[in-house]
Image (tube, helix red, strand yellow):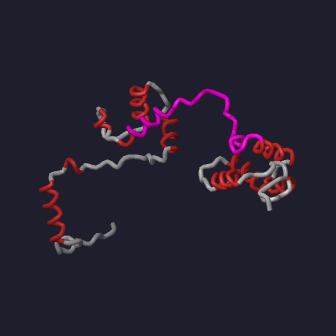
Amino acid sequence: MEWGTDVTGPISPTQRATVEALLRERDLRARVRERLEMVKGAALGWEVAAIAVWCGRTEATVRRWLGAFRDGGVAALADAPRPGRPRQADTAYLTALETAVEANPRALGQGFDVWTSARLSGYLAETTGTRIAPGWLRVLLHRQRFANGRPKHSVAHLQDPAEVAACEERLRVVGEKGEGRPRPLRTPF
């Protein structure tokens, strides 16, 4: 059976391999995945009506996307560019963000040990010239798969190691029950 001759015309083995490889990708946009599935259905010999029922679209929509694939290949199934203001966080900004997050703030000349979104936003505004609000910066960090949260503060660096060792030894000697003396009973009033 030929890989599809309905609306798309014959599909070459190269196109079939491309469609199937794209369908295996995890981060593919849902709309593009649906269009690729339409093409695959047509290539497997499904009727346009069956594809429309399967994907919940009209037959005209299915024909439009199958025709777009016939005329322009896989690239014709992509979403059109969205109108509006261009993104401020370009590749250079994202690279600077990743470098800053992975580095110790003190190593970058900052006077603190832990990044906050406000501090990171200010630092990146100085270094890249692009100001992004701390809330949007947290969105970018999430998209880049960085985890953010509150730091755990400790006073371990302020403690004398000899005193800590002496206290731990004393606790080991007395055990969990104290020094072996019974405690006085508490009586209610």
Quadrant housing residue 115: top left
Q: Report the span colored magenta.
A: 71-99
Above or below 154: residue 182: below
Magenta stretch encompasses residue 80:
yes
Q: Residue at x 29, y 69 (%)?
A: 186
Q: Residue at x 17, y 57 (%)?
A: 164
* Between 66 and 61, the one nearer to me in the picture: 66
Q: Is residue 117 left or right of residue 68?
A: left
* Between 181 and 189, the one nearer to me in the picture: 181
Quadrant housing residue 80: top right
Q: Residue at x 42, y 27 (%)?
A: 128
Above or below 32: residue 189: below
Q: Is residue 85 left or right of residue 144?
A: right
Which percent across, then down, holds residue 17? 66, 55
* Between 11 and 27, the one nearer to me in the picture: 11
Quarter the C terminus occupies = bottom left
Magenta stretch encompasses residue 88:
yes
